[in-house]
Amino acid sequence: MIIEEEFSMVHSLFKQGNSIRDIAKQTGLNRRTVTRKLKQDKNVIKKRPYKSKLDDFRPYII
């Protein structure tokens, strides 16, 4: 997962005129990850809503 600092670093390096391959080498990220993050405006972290094993028993517990 890419963190906020890496996201801003990728965008700043690209604005400075570095190529995607150079950015990938400097940050240690994959080229495809760099390309995907450059297409996004913000660093969006998607979390999946997982159901807890205790959700069915929540009324009894509380």
Image (cartoon, rainbow, N blue to C red):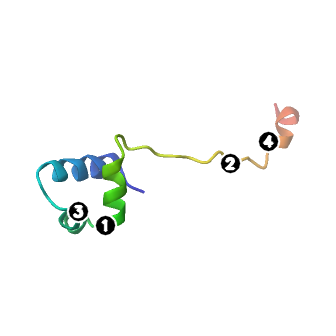
Q: Residue at x 47, y 46 (%)?
A: 45
Q: Answer yes or no: do the residues labelled 2 and 3 have beta carbons within 8 Å?
A: no
Residue under the image location 34 percent in, 52 percent down? 37
The answer to whether the residue labelled 3 contacts the one labelled 4, judged by CB atoms less than 8 Å apart, is: no
Q: Residues within 10 Å of mark 4 (few under 14, many from 20)?
A: few
Q: Which residue is mark 4?
A: 55
Mark 2 lies on residue: 50
Q: What's the distance in space between the residues labelled 3 and 4, CA to CA?
A: 45 Å
Q: Quadrant of residue 27?
A: bottom left
- Label 1 vs 4, first from the N-terminus: 1
What is the three-letter code of the residue carrying label 4? Asp
Question: Which type of secondary structure does the marked residue at label 1 adopt?
Answer: helix
Mark 1 → mark 3, Cα distance in angstroms: 6 Å
Question: What amino acid is labelled 3 in the image?
Answer: Ile
C-beta proximity under 8 Å, tags 1 and 3: yes
- Separation of marks 2 and 4 at Cα, in angstroms: 10 Å
Q: Secondary structure at mark 3?
A: helix
Using the numbered discs, state the Cα–Cα distance from disc 2 to disc 3 in whole angstroms.
35 Å
Between discs 2 and 4, the one toward the N terminus: 2
Asked whether, in this view, residue 25 is left or right of residue 52, the answer is left
The residue under label 3 is 20
* Of marks 1 and 2, the one in the foreground: 1
Q: Amino acid at mark 1?
A: Arg
Q: Which of disc 2 and disc 1 is earlier in sequence?
A: 1
Dot 1, crowdedness within 10 Å: few (<14), some or many (≥20)? some
